[in-house]
Image (cartoon, rainbow, N blue to C red):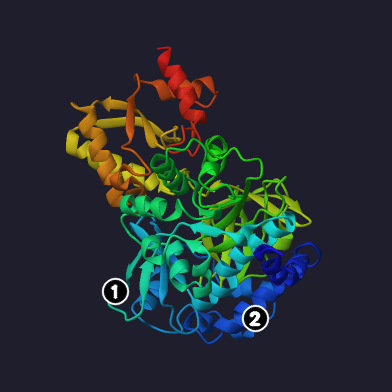
Amino acid sequence: MSITQIAGRFFVPRQKELEKHFSQPEELQHRVLARLMAAAADTEYGRDHLFGSVNNYEQFAANCPVNSYEDLKDFIDRMRHGESDVLWKGKVRWYAKSSGTTNDKSKFIPVSADGLKDTHYQGGKDAVAYYLDNNPKSRLFDGRALILGGSHSPNYNVANSLVGDLSAILIENINPMANLVRVPKKQTALLSDFEVKRDRIARETIGKNVTNISGVPSWMMSVLTRVMELTGKTHLEEVWPNLEVFFHGGVAFEPYRKQYEQLITSPKMHYQETYNASEGFFGIQNDPADRSMMLMLDYGVFYEFIPMDEFGKDNPTVIPLWGVETGCNYAMVISTSCGLWRYVIGDTVKFTSTKPYKFVITGRTKHFINAFGEELIVDNADKALTYVCNETGAAVADYTAAPVFMDNNAKCRHQWLIDFAVEPKDISTFATLLDKRLQQLNSDYEAKRYKDITLQPLEIVVTRRGLFDEWLKMKGKLGGQHKVPRLSNSREIIEQLLTLNSRG
């Protein structure tokens, strides 16, 4: 009997319990809300919003407002300085650093001990539970797991309190037994210099029996490219013949799928998507034939949704899970065991099924580029362009930007299409200044641009004057409120504009 067959027995009870997502989904969510209210009743936020007297969803929604990060920022900052019982019971020691908002370079998301256990780690276990259920002949635990991680640093001067990438927080707090089956070693996984880390990960893992890999597709591809460089092999299964699954999340996988399938040609290779973010672990692909994910309903997360056609309006409709419909685009709102209350996470989802509740991620509540985990928002782009125009004397009439996805050498970048009202004297200087300013405004973009490892310097294509208006006219959208999206996570629009520009 293999190690995986023995270990798999421990997942059987949970596999049966997960069936309640089909039979009792609404009941699971009611239980989560009651548990969250009871746990936070004696916190400052809980007392202010009468959590102790909440008996149902309607009372919770009436007592607690929908919140943005700015609404909770002061509470979180006090928690980071060591205050207890603010948004969640006790002291919260860990804070996941993610891309910023309009006013800040970075957000700091509290990650409580409860949240680690009932949400983040539970999500990882359930991903394995679903995978083993779908693949009874798996040898997952007969080898090593290559898990990518970020880095962390001290949080202010508070003892035993740290901020960092969620992945680093998970590695730092993981059960020591897990280190027996994962690679690379912890010291390597938590290195902050990704160029050094990538090389060390490759060297430490080449001789290991790696059966599964986990991480963000863009980061992982960069590591795997280094593995291939060092080994001189053509396909990854020549290095790790027992590799069978990639647990991926963080950014959309589809732009990378072809590249992974070219690198890994083994017919036994599987891909499983997860929706894990700094704020929580929300979804798992439970059916390899269906690319939508199960919404995980019995973690420390209570879900609500705002229809996107009402998002941004005063007093939009906010509905619980049992009010959603398939085919509608929703902004997701969460309340969690980390102290985020009716928090607008910024992601949009669309349900493909309500029996069970399955969904796909459709994007962000604002135009953005997040092809590689950089989470660039329009506010970043507008502020950066304003700064660079002031520095160079240029003026921008219109612009759009989109990702250029990885080529065979794992190179990628952002491509900017700009209609200048006043062109800069040196477009390369303008591009360099823009790139540097974006890094100053957005910590995730800065991290992906570090030493050109994941993102190469941005590219600017200067258009002929009036190109954007021509495109809008062609679409019957010239005038009024219509405009070309500033940022897009796909290349559909920018390719149309480039084609139109080439005809000029």
Q: Position of residue 337 (x, y in %)?
A: 55, 74
Q: Which mark is residue 358?
A: none
Asked which secondary structure carries label 2, the reply is loop
Q: Circle 2 is placed at which residue position?
A: 54
Q: Is residue 317 visible?
A: no
Label 1 neighbourhood size at 10 Å, few (<14), some (14-19), many (20+)? few
Residue at x 41%, y 33% (from the top left corner): 400
Q: 381 left or right of 131? A: left
Q: Which is more toward the observer, 307 or 38?
A: 38
Residue that badge 1 annotates? 156
Quarter of the figure with the N terminus: bottom right
Q: x, y percentage for residue 372?
A: 44, 45
Q: Residue at x 45, y 45 (%)?
A: 224
Question: Is any part of residue 365 visible from this angle?
Answer: yes
How far is the residue under mark 1 from the one under mark 2?
35 Å
Quadrant of residue 467 in the image? top left
For the residue labelled by badge 1, is the local secondary structure a helix, a strand or a loop?
A: loop
| Left or right, residue 98 beside residue 31 | left
* 416 vs 199: above or below: above
* Nearest to N terminus: mark 1 or mark 2: 2
**Residue 497 to residue 58: above or below:** above
Q: Pinpoint residue 352: horizontal percent, then vertical percent.
A: 72, 48
Residue 442 vs residue 96, the one in the foreground: 96
Residue located 50% across and 21% down the image: 473
Q: Amino acid at mark 1?
A: Tyr
Question: Where the C terminus falls, by quadrant?
Answer: top left
Question: In this view of the protein, which residue sits in the foreground, 210 or 320?
Answer: 210
User: Which amino acid is tagged 2?
Assistant: Val
Identity of the residue furthest to the right in this view:
23
